[in-house]
Image (spheres, grey):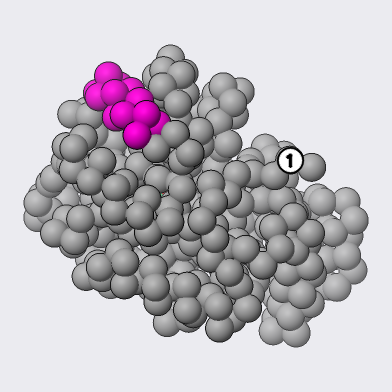
Amino acid sequence: MRELVDKLQEERRLEKQEWICLIQDRNESLDEYIFEKARSERELYYGNKVYIRGLIEFTNYCKNDCYYCGIRRSNKKLERYRLTESQILDCCDIGYELGFRTFVLQGGEDGGYTDEKIVHLVQSMKALYPDCAVTLSIGEKKKESYEAFFQAGADRYLLRHETANANHYRKLHPEELTLENRIQCLMNLKEIGYQTGCGFMVGSPYQTADTLAEDMMFIQNFQPHMVGIGPFIPHHQTPFADMEGGSVELTLTLLGLLRIMIPNLLLPATTALGTLHPRGRERGMAAGANVVMPNLSPIDVREKYLLYDNKICTGDEAAESLQHLKQTMKDAGYEVVTSRGDFIHK
Ligand code: 5AD
């Protein structure tokens, strides 16, 4: 097994069967071997720095009906909200003072937030905070829309591919959503010039070692700048309410393997990981992550942006939780920095 990890470090890619072996036969002692290598790879590009991103969950309206997601359109119990541009700029103001130099605008696919509104919003953010990066995480759009947002100044885009296997994709999404379109969106984003992020949930329903191997193969071919992975956590008002959640351990192993595969990757220790384990985000760092995305959304809307149950930090003041994050990271040997934290090219 260690030979496979060595090979990954040498060649930065593996065959499908090799990925399956690593995923199926993972164990604690192999993990230590993986994490050690992952940390030394990360060190070369990013040292012991932790990049922070201020996450602004600006709308929970969504036209999609993904079976796993708490803000799917069929969740009629959910009270919907949409922040105004000025509310969003207030979040940025607070975030900038705290030292955030990247703002992530994340939302459902909300037809009420037209392309024109997004363009205006991005322009305003870049005018007020020219030294900050703006990341969009607003789903599948036409290529022209992605171009318009990029022209307006958006720097990065997160669009998890969710699964690289078309049959698996079918089981997670209604028919109107296709893997083909998802991948086309990702290719468009990268071609336009965004720092582009894909990713998937670990332990999503119907996921197998085989589909996970395909995820890793997709990522080694696509060569994204960012990869977001976190455990699947059921949400009680979705069709997957009674499904089993994903494993923290497997998530950590995959974080380590992703770091070894793409040493200069921007790799967050996600909120979902922090939700399933009290030290999840620190453990994510120890496995090879280098990004954390604290919540900057106004406290009164956070309970309405629950993609899954028991999400952490929904009641925490931004300033306080950042202070806490800085301290826990420092104790673990990492330094939270005030920086855009761009992708470093080889
Ligand atoms: N558990 C974990 N992650 C989820 N996401 C959506 N629903 C869940 C859930 N129940 C993830 C998806 C999406 C990202 C914004 O959040 O991967 O792309």
Does residue 286 appear in this view? yes
Q: In the rendered image, is residue 232 in sight?
A: no
Say whether residue 115 is magenta. yes
> Of helix, strand and loop, which one carries label 1?
loop
Figure quadrant of the C terminus: top right
Report the front residue among 245 and 231.
231
73 sits to left or right of 92: left
Q: Residue at x 46, y 19 (%)?
A: 151
At x 51% / y 56%, what residue is drawn? Answer: 338
Quadrant (top left, top right, bottom left, bottom right) of the N terminus: bottom right
Expressed as whole percent of the image width and height from the top left, the position of residue 70 reads 25, 55
From the image, tell me which residue sits under label 1: 345
Residue at 62% x, 63% y is 49
Residue 21: percent from the left, percent from the top? 76, 66
Q: How many marks?
A: 1
Asked if the beta carbon under badge 1 is closer than 8 A to the nearest atom of ligand 1, the reply is no
Foreground residue among 86 and 22: 86
Give the overall secondary structure of the magenta segment.
helix
Q: Which residues are magenta?
A: 114-128
Q: Is residue 266 left or right of residue 143?
A: right
Above or below 76: residue 240: below
Q: Position of residue 312 (x, y in %)?
A: 31, 71
**Observer-nearest of 97 and 213:** 97
Whether residue 344 sits left or right of residue 11 in the image: it is: left
- The amino acid on which the numbered mark 1 sits, given as a three-letter code, is His
Residue count near mark 1 (Cα–Cα under 10 Å), binned few <14, some 14–19, many ≥20: few
The answer to which of 248 and 95 lies nearer the viewer is: 95
* Residue 28 rendering spot, x and y as whole percentages: 69, 84
User: Is residue 260 located in the magenta-colored stretch of the structure?
Assistant: no
